[in-house]
Image: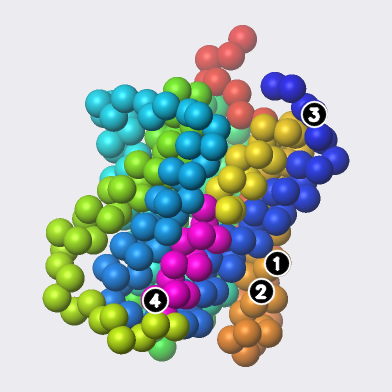
């Protein structure tokens, strides 16, 4: 990899994380009352338009769609997005975002099976600590939220599977192309699941969903550029600044407060994610 802007790359990664949280904020703040299908389809249309513009600007041809792993990844992405949007509109903002980021824990746990990567004792300990932290955060809301509490975990698991299949695909598909195909899949699934309950009389909510989609597209471009400009092992931890952005948004915008047990659980998750992000991945049979 050519490292052309090693000092700029971390800033781009942190900015990309900010736009990801901004995407979630628009949906939570202005569009929570819209049907889940409509939120996902409209947001995906905006992301789709962003991806098409990027591909056109770069002059990049679309790769072949006839790839089983690509279809599997798209399926995991659709499941991840549906579960996350349900969690986002039904649960406290900070809880949905923090638990969704535990997908990194599922990646570390399942990578030995899917990618034949080595699961070291340190990684296993980090996964255990992170899951314990997630359990603490979820237990605080379990009584009030009931069965809805499972959706952040489903989102995290499906997101972890999506990341594993992204690695399986390797460099054949760019991040823009993967996002493009996932957006197409979400639009098709959303329309097939029905449009009868959609509403078009709330212009503010619809514009917020479109803005969320554009934020997602910008975030994808910034994060991809950051990984291209800097060493992945140095740049990737700055993705975790989304936890800071999420905490600030939850406190300032949504007026959420954090109990000592929630802060302790969030701290365990952050520690676990830092350990996993900074740990090098090596094949299981590496001599």
Which residues make up the magenta segment?
Answer: 205-217
Is the residue marked by circle 3 packed among few (<14), some (14-19), or many (20+) residues within 10 Å? few
Report the front residue among 87 and 192: 192
Q: What residue sits right under mark 1 in the picture? A: 244
Label 3, label 2: how many angstroms apart (C-alpha)? 32 Å
Which numbered disc covers residue 66?
none
Q: Nearer the viewer, mark 3 or mark 4?
A: 4
Query: Where 189 sits versus 222, above or below?
Result: below
Label 3, label 4: how many angstroms apart (C-alpha)? 39 Å
Is the residue marked by circle 2 packed among few (<14), some (14-19), or many (20+) residues within 10 Å? many
Report the residue at 44% width, 83% height from top.
204
Label 1, label 4: how many angstroms apart (C-alpha)? 27 Å
Report the front residue among 66 and 117: 66
Report the residue at 48% width, 44% height from top.
53
Q: Quadrant of residue 194?
A: bottom left
Q: Nearer the viewer, mark 3 or mark 2?
A: 3
Q: Nearer the viewer, mark 1 or mark 3?
A: 3
Which numbered disc covers residue 247?
2
Looking at this view, name the residue that lies furthest to the top: 287
| Relative horizontal placement of residue 216, taking residue 158 as reference (left or right) | right
Q: Position of residue 241 (x, y in %)?
A: 70, 59
Callouts 2 and 1 close, C-beta under 8 Å: yes
Report the front residue among 129 and 97: 97
Q: Nearer the viewer, mark 4 or mark 2?
A: 4
| Relative horizontal placement of residue 256, taking residue 135 as reference (left or right) | right
| Relative horizontal placement of residue 185, taking residue 138 as reference (left or right) | left
Report the residue at 61% width, 40% height from top.
224
Which numbered disc covers residue 206?
4
Q: Earlier in the sequence, mark 1 or mark 3?
A: 3
Q: Position of residue 21 (x, y in %)?
A: 59, 66
């Amino acid at each position: 990899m050519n490292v052309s802007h090693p000092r700029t790359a971390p800033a781009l990664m942190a900015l990309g994380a900010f736009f990801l949280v901004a995407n979630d904020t628009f949906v939570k703040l202005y569009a929570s009352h819209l049907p889940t299908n409509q939120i996902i389809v409209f947001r995906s249309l905006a992301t789709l338009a962003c991806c098409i513009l990027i591909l056109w600007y770069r002059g990049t041809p679309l790769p072949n769609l006839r790839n089983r792993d690509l279809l599997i990844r798209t399926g995991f992405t659709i499941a991840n997005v549906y579960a996350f949007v349900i969690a986002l509109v039904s649960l406290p903002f900070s809880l949905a975002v923090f638990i969704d980021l535990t997908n990194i824990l599922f990646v570390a746990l399942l990578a030995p099976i899917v990618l034949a990567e080595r699961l070291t004792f340190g990684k296993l300990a980090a996964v255990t600590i992170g899951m314990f932290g997630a359990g603490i955060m979820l237990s605080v809301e379990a009584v009030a939220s009931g069965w809805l509490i499972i959706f952040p975990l489903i989102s995290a698991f499906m997101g972890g599977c999506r990341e594993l299949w992204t690695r399986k695909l390797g460099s054949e598909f760019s991040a823009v192309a993967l996002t493009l195909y996932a957006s197409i899949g979400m639009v098709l699934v959303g329309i097939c699941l029905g449009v009868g309950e959609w509403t078009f009389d709330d212009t503010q909510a619809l514009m917020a969903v479109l803005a969320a989609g554009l934020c997602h597209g910008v975030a994808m471009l910034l994060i991809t550029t950051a990984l291209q400009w800097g060493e992945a092992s140095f740049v990737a931890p700055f993705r975790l600044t989304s936890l800071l952005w999420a905490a600030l948004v939850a406190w300032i915008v949504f007026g959420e407060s954090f109990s000592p047990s929630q802060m302790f659980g969030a701290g365990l998750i952050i520690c676990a994610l830092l350990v996993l992000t900074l740990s090098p991945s090596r094949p299981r049979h590496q001599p």
